[in-house]
Image (tube, rainbow, N blue to C red):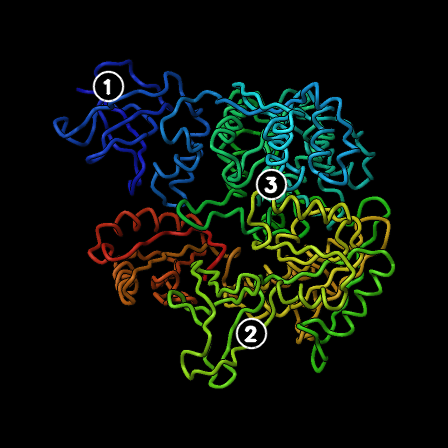
Amino acid sequence: MTKTLAVAVPGPFLAPLDYLPPSDSPQPPIGSRVRVPLGRREVIGIVTAERDQSTINESRLRAVTRVIDEAPLLPTSLMSLIAWAARYYHHPIGEAYATALPARLRQGQPAVPGEQTYWRITTTGREQSADAWQKRAPRQAMLLQALKDNDALAAGDLAGLGGDARGALQRLVERGFAEAIKRSDYGTIQAETTAPAPVLNDAQATTAARIMPGEGHQAILLEGVTGSGKTEVYLDAIARATEMGLQSLVIVPEIGLTPQLLSRFRRRLNARIAVLHSGLADGERLNAWLAAAHGRADVIIGTRSAVFVPLARPGLMIVDEEHDASLKQQEGFRYSARDLAVLRAHRAEVPVVLGSATPALETLANAAQKRYLHCQLNERAGNARPPSMQLLDMRGQPTQEGLSQPLITRVGEHLEADGQVLLFLNRRGFAPVIICHECGWLAECERCDARYTYHRGRRRLHCHHCDSERRIPDACPQCGSVDLRPLGLGTERIEAALEAAFPETPLVRIDRDTTRRRGGFEQQMAAAVRGDARLLLGTQMLAKGHHLPAVTLVAIIDADQGLFGADFRAAERLAQLVVQVAGRAGRAERPGEVVIQTHHPEHPLLQTLIHGGYPAFARTALLEREAAGLPPSRAMALLRAEAVQREAPMRFLRAASRIAPQYRGLECLGPYPAPMEKRAGRFRAQLMLQADERAVLQTMLEAWVPQLQPLREARAVRWSIDVDPTETL
């Protein structure tokens, strides 16, 4: 009887494949990488098990061609988590393992730290005065001072410095003020610990005391109003975990939140910090991953995929802004980092903290059922007070490019009082529609069921769904008229209106268009935090988790965008966004004010938020979801399909529906075209599954999914399963 190895390889395989052990090298350990033949090529796989025998005839089995790791690369606990996630989300096991590994390890490169670039000051640079360079090259002056204050700066140290810090360092090198050196190490960031910890208020202290690293598993929902000091509670718990020699994993939804959080952690923690996100170079990402795995990092801050990072001494897990949709992967392996963090903490017997001012309804339901300990911070920290909120009825109001006169007046009053004003519109570009005034023609994307957005700065029409672009036509292609007009509002248009209304006031616009360049977001946010810009305008990039102490007025330009969305989560998303944006106002000593422009001031959602806040909205929404039989009261999954031919997805889904196992308490709804049926040149449709019990849904999917690939209709489509979808569009 020949023993075989189970190897998880990239590809559409729900289970590992069987291979013979290598003939010319030692047996690879479980959790190590191997190179194996797959079809006509060779791929990198992970050894997941040893088997006494295979269901496949030995003559058909192929052997491992090379063992890459002599020792396990992944611990068994993490392998168990990845295998569970692959089963729960019904995704190919090899692709799940690939998600958990940095790019260089997926490519078969050695699991050793690579060379890191460091910068240190030269003798000539030390003789320079940073103050003398402040006016002509402020970023170089800042970096010159940082080099004087530190033995060396690593790539990770540049996070939060704003702008193109690497470029500024290169210019210092060219001037002979600094030199770049290379050395192999893990690239962790040593904390500065220059700021003493503030005394926690009673609510913070009570909550912090409930987080007990080293004393077993707890799942804690930390619901705190914006500005209530949730981060101080995190820091207190992390500091205690570090003192015990334990590691803390902090997951944030977006890269944009990482620099500000990192800067704050560095000032407060006596710890080695590693950062993991997609904005890092491959070598930097590998080094941070290895630092966590080898115990060389005490605190790991990362985005979604960091939930899979190996930890040598796990002690605490934190998911910040746990409600954020970015924590759910929307392509490929559609996992929820929040949910997996809870499971991983449970298995590791460590505390997990889910923090948010606007918790997801699923999280609130778990807290109501006593699965999570619910801790609340209902007041802002220090002397800060909640902002006043009011609706501004736009009906019949004269406007200047979407800004009503009462709002313009209010902005002027806050600027005169030396306040900072934040205006929010979650739509970039100049206008979402270009229309012919003569015949009504609309500029529509040929590849999507969507209209082109007009970007005046680039003089281009851009589809934000498929990323296609075209130039603006000189005349209407339908009637020949040259009277083409932009309709609707975008951040570019609001920017032009603000510049016209307040020509002497510095303004910064923060959206995906203004932050495309490397370091662009950090540079813009640094100007906002310093107060260099008095007017701040942006999309949701500006709204999430940023501390802007000088902001005294927040204006939501158009609250009506999400009031009538097709997705059943649209109201929840809008409520969270309004509360999060409003929370940027009045975070310091000065009182804050929030103005919400709307054509529907009587809408129940807006009225509930104004008078009862997010908790009142959540209570109502949970009751509505239960009455409608929607999550979190029921479990849901979507089978999605897309193809170039319009009918192919529907044919596949109908065939899938016919072979779907029937269970009591389970519904199969559809198939039906997706709300945006055509996207990026492909037609999309979906089949919705709902069940009273999650276990029933999983049992059904386990029996059903393996039958889908062999369907003849499956050959004409791309299909995927999305368990616990956060979007049904």
Residue at 46% across, 74% down: 474
**Distance CA(mark 1)–CA(mark 2):** 65 Å
Based on the displayed image, in which of its 4 quarters is residue 394 positioned? bottom right
Q: Which residue is mark 3?
A: 319
Q: Which residue is mark 1?
A: 22
Based on the displayed image, in which of its 4 quarters is residue 564 positioned? bottom right
The earlier-in-sequence mark between 1 and 2 is 1
Q: Which residue is mark 2?
A: 486
Q: Tell me the amino acid under the disc marked 1.
A: Pro
Q: Tell me the amino acid under the disc marked 3.
A: Val
* Mark linked to residue 392: none
Judged from this view, the residue extending furthest toward the front is: 175
> Up-down: is 544 above or below 147?
below
**Quadrant (top left, top right, bottom left, bottom right) of the N terminus:** top left
Residue at 46% across, 85% down: 439
Element marked by disc 2: strand
**Quadrant (top left, top right, bottom left, bottom right) of the C terminus:** bottom left
**Distance CA(mark 2)–CA(mark 3):** 41 Å
Crowding at dot 1, Cα within 10 Å, few <14 / some 14-19 / many 20+, comes out as some
Closer to the camera in the image, 265 or 12: 265
Q: Is residue 273 left or right of residue 441?
A: right
The earlier-in-sequence mark between 2 and 3 is 3
Q: Nearer the viewer, mark 3 or mark 1?
A: 1
Is residue 421 visible to the viewer in this orientation of the structure?
Answer: yes
> Up-down: is 326 above or below 664?
above
Q: Is residue 726 left or right of residue 410?
A: left
Element marked by disc 3: strand
> In x, y percent, where is residue 380?
79, 48
Residue at 64% across, 40% down: 220
Element marked by disc 1: loop
Closer to the camera in the image, 66 or 457: 457
Closer to the camera in the image, 623 or 202: 202
